[in-house]
Amino acid sequence: MLKKIERAIISVSDKSNLEKLLKILKKFKIEILSSGGTFKAIKKLKFNCQEISSFTGFNEMLDGRVKTLHPKIHAGILHDRKNTKHKKEMRENNYDPIDLIIVNFYPFEENLNATKNIKRIIENIDIGGPSMVRGAAKNYENTTIVTNTSDYENLINELKINNGKTSLAFREKMASKAFGLTAFYDSKICDWFNDKTNNKFPELKVISGKRFEKLRYGENPHQQSAIYVNDTLGKGIGLEKLNGKNLSYNNYNDIFAAIEILKSTKKKNLTVIIKHANPCGVAFNESSLKSFQNALKSDPVSAFGGIVACNYKINSKIALEMNKTFFEVIAAYGFDNSALKILKKKKNLRIIDLSSFDNKNNQAYKFFDNSFLLQEKDETIFDKKKLKCVTKDTLSKKELLEIEFAFRVCKFVKSNAIVLVKDFATLGIGAGQQNRLDSCKIAIQKAKKFHPTKIKSCIAASDAFFPFADGLKSLINAGVKIVVQPGGSIRDKEVINEARKRKIKMIFTGTRHFNH
Amino acid sequence: MLKKIERAIISVSDKSNLEKLLKILKKFKIEILSSGGTFKAIKKLKFNCQEISSFTGFNEMLDGRVKTLHPKIHAGILHDRKNTKHKKEMRENNYDPIDLIIVNFYPFEENLNATKNIKRIIENIDIGGPSMVRGAAKNYENTTIVTNTSDYENLINELKINNGKTSLAFREKMASKAFGLTAFYDSKICDWFNDKTNNKFPELKVISGKRFEKLRYGENPHQQSAIYVNDTLGKGIGLEKLNGKNLSYNNYNDIFAAIEILKSTKKKNLTVIIKHANPCGVAFNESSLKSFQNALKSDPVSAFGGIVACNYKINSKIALEMNKTFFEVIAAYGFDNSALKILKKKKNLRIIDLSSFDNKNNQAYKFFDNSFLLQEKDETIFDKKKLKCVTKDTLSKKELLEIEFAFRVCKFVKSNAIVLVKDFATLGIGAGQQNRLDSCKIAIQKAKKFHPTKIKSCIAASDAFFPFADGLKSLINAGVKIVVQPGGSIRDKEVINEARKRKIKMIFTGTRHFNH
């Protein structure tokens, strides 16, 4: 299954590492065809090369839109070397085999980032390149396809080992990569068209990513895993690791859960502590030190071994505080040098700089076995105009701000969610329960344990309406004075009456925040 | 921006609905080029049509692998009609514009389902079609591209309205669809290659789906949403709705959570009740009626408004029982006619037949803003050979089976998860907590409330190890007699000693089941 290579086409946007490749092609007397910029680059490096137009006898036209879209090129790539009829037709047409295609595409995605000029973007949709790549990949039994400069080394080794030939296994692997690239490339073009035409739910949806790193394992040690990025232009995943072991699957999961909360506001200083993808402490404070302390105090038992994320820079004072607790990850918008020094004393502690993380996407996916749900992200907290105090009380400015804080946190807790808040810090978070009363109970138990005084005048937020008055009753009995919830239950009247009777304030937002 | 169409290429695998289309093309005197089977089909319908080979002056070769890959075709598609240089080159070459491309591809995916013959599969990778489609879509400012028979009607209307011309908006929309198709098509080819070469984590990963239906809204009413299927070959999503309103986002989410549990075993009769993506009742029983009753009894408060899923057929007895509770969805492996009649009395109840649902995929995705985690599905419960009774007790066959049942359920509960079980039915499920002790408490509270007697001799399963002995102590105090957990904590010794001291049995599985 080894195939001798006699003739190659090289047509590359990325002209790096060409020389090494050309040397080995020369060594094995492989004839080279090229055109345009690649042709010039090869000539400049003083290697022999024939222009594609002289090979086909057809002058390229339409500013290069049509040059390789020619039967002599495609028959050269596509014919079955073992098929007598194919061989006869090649002879009759006086066509020669082309056994190696080294092509990378017009940089469509790079251009998207560089320009808003539609003409230029469209000009960077490569037509000839993908046609050759797909043809060569289809015919991998005969033809070798290389689409990435990072594979030059592999090709060189392959040719060396096999004395100018390539193995079927190599060609198959390269073909697999080639179709990965054409699918990926067209997914980017398709995304661009869908954005342009505001088509959020196209009939065919294609989602693509570039492997960022393989992970030691997945959610559990017996599962293999890797993490992929959508945006392939260099910046990677937006998390800069300053210390510690590689991030694990569960670290990533928790960090992204934290980032979602941090990115939901521009207000400093927010601290979020996450455990098992749920927040177990969230606090906002004018002092960043206090912000961290309050988030930690919320539920210090759960915080143990969790991840902390801050939308502010860590100074040495905070670092000293942080070092008193065992965390898996500390992520922040930068670290003072002195703070880093303190934190780095813990060799295994993963320290992550979030400064360059950037939100890109306003769509959320949930995958199942053979299907996926696609939805717009939940990007509002509530519409202030829709806020309604159903107990007809007046709310102070601070109360309004705190209601927003409580409801914001609630949005990010897995449903059913109940969040108790005092002074812009969580006191108790009831997460992931199958009924609302249980979530109320959990939030109350936690707040009673860690904040027995503060619970007496706190705010409660609920991600969805109270189906019965029972949950509300338990909150009021525990000392809650203000409740914020979407409203909308058929028993709203009963619930409102309970609030009025017990003289607490209740606000309806009209916005629900289920999150599973 | 209206463009008159003078010449069209038609090359379709799916030859349905051609006549209607040909009539309108004839009406507007549009010249037609075609080849092979499509040419014959057009001739048979008695419409004029020129063979592509006579148009290009080039005979198709290599069994049709090369026919449209010709500069006359691609320049005809790709030239800019407003560009003087392009127009000059077209004249010099004596090339004519091709303004409309109607192409669908070789049925690659259909062939995958029909054959294991690699040659045949590869022959169905279309090269010429995608080249024309991509070229026409790139040049949508001048060229109209139609890739699906379902768009014939739209094209016909467009031509009628605009008197043989197409609008820019129409061409852009069609171009967007075309790149959706090429990306989708290549994602399927790429998946095939990756499967073939057992490449689970390719450098470029492309995931695709076909829109199955738009949903009324997403997880919350202010989010738009749609559901997509991976497998586009007819069978759809595998859920047959027999009654009730359309499934909502949250219904789908809960149903798929239930299916994961059902599909994890072949053993009948399993009933699962899901609320907010967490099970709140799971039971196995030789009697299907009992299975349902026990699942419901587990936590009847949470079950209210939940979804029930059964891996057995529903008879009238069970239907009568089911009708006593308010469920959003009842999903099962078939329904007796009499059962259906009973259940359908509730007009809004969604009744779903799961019989044709089929597991396809062993990969799981989790999406974040600009990245995604890809992992193998968690498909084991535990390895029986690794089971270790760390308290050195002997276990009866029934105990072993029940341990497996408890650990199985635990695997599907959001972490931290504690599941209490007696007689193959859950008594209490502690889900989604940020620390293990809280999950223990929740499971105990629920079991005490609904099963005060049974809790005295039940089994507890934990999805991960006990980091301290506190959680275990609370379980033993509540009456738990057997604990199954992965083990692996640095405090295992302390935990084992506690179990021994209190004379309960404890089994280590060596397998963890985090699930977030």
Image (spheres, coloured by chain):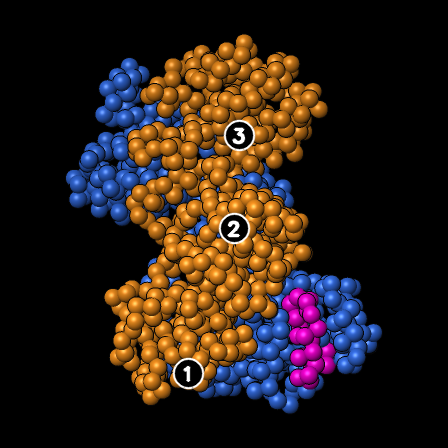
Chain colours: A blue, B orange
> Residue A10 falls in which quadrant of the image?
top left
Identify which residue is drawn at 38% across, 17% down: B60
Query: Quick one: label 2, few (<14), some, or many (20+) residues within 10 Å?
Result: some
| Residue A481 screen position, x and y as percent | 72, 81
Residue denoted by label 1: B476
Evaluate if marks 2 and 1 touch, with contact meaning CB atoms under 8 Å apart.
no
Identify which residue is drawn at 49% across, 32% down: B134
> Residue A170 falls in which quadrant of the image?
top left
Which one is in front in this view, the residue at disc 2 or the one at disc 1? Answer: 2
Residue denoted by label 2: B315
Q: Which residues are magenta?
A: A461-482
Query: Gap between marks 2 and 1, in whole Å?
Result: 40 Å
Left or right of A223 on screen, residue A385 = right
Residue denoted by label 3: B147
Which one is in front in this view, the residue at disc 3 or the one at disc 1? Answer: 1
Left or right of B203 on screen, residue B272 = right
Circle 1 chain: B
Evaluate if marks 2 and 3 touch, with contact meaning CB atoms under 8 Å apart.
no
| Residue A206 screen position, x and y as percent | 50, 44
Amino acid at pointer 3: Thr
Q: Is residue A497 above or below residue B372?
A: below
Q: Secondary structure at mark 3?
A: loop
Query: Quick one: label 3, few (<14), some, or many (20+) residues within 10 Å?
Result: many
Amino acid at pointer 1: Ile
Q: Is residue A463 above or below residue A365?
A: below
The answer to which of marks 2 and 3 sits earlier in the sequence is 3
Is the same chain shared between marks 3 and 1? yes
The answer to which of marks 3 and 1 sits earlier in the sequence is 3
Identify which residue is drawn at 49% across, 44% down: B238
Q: Secondary structure at mark 1?
A: helix
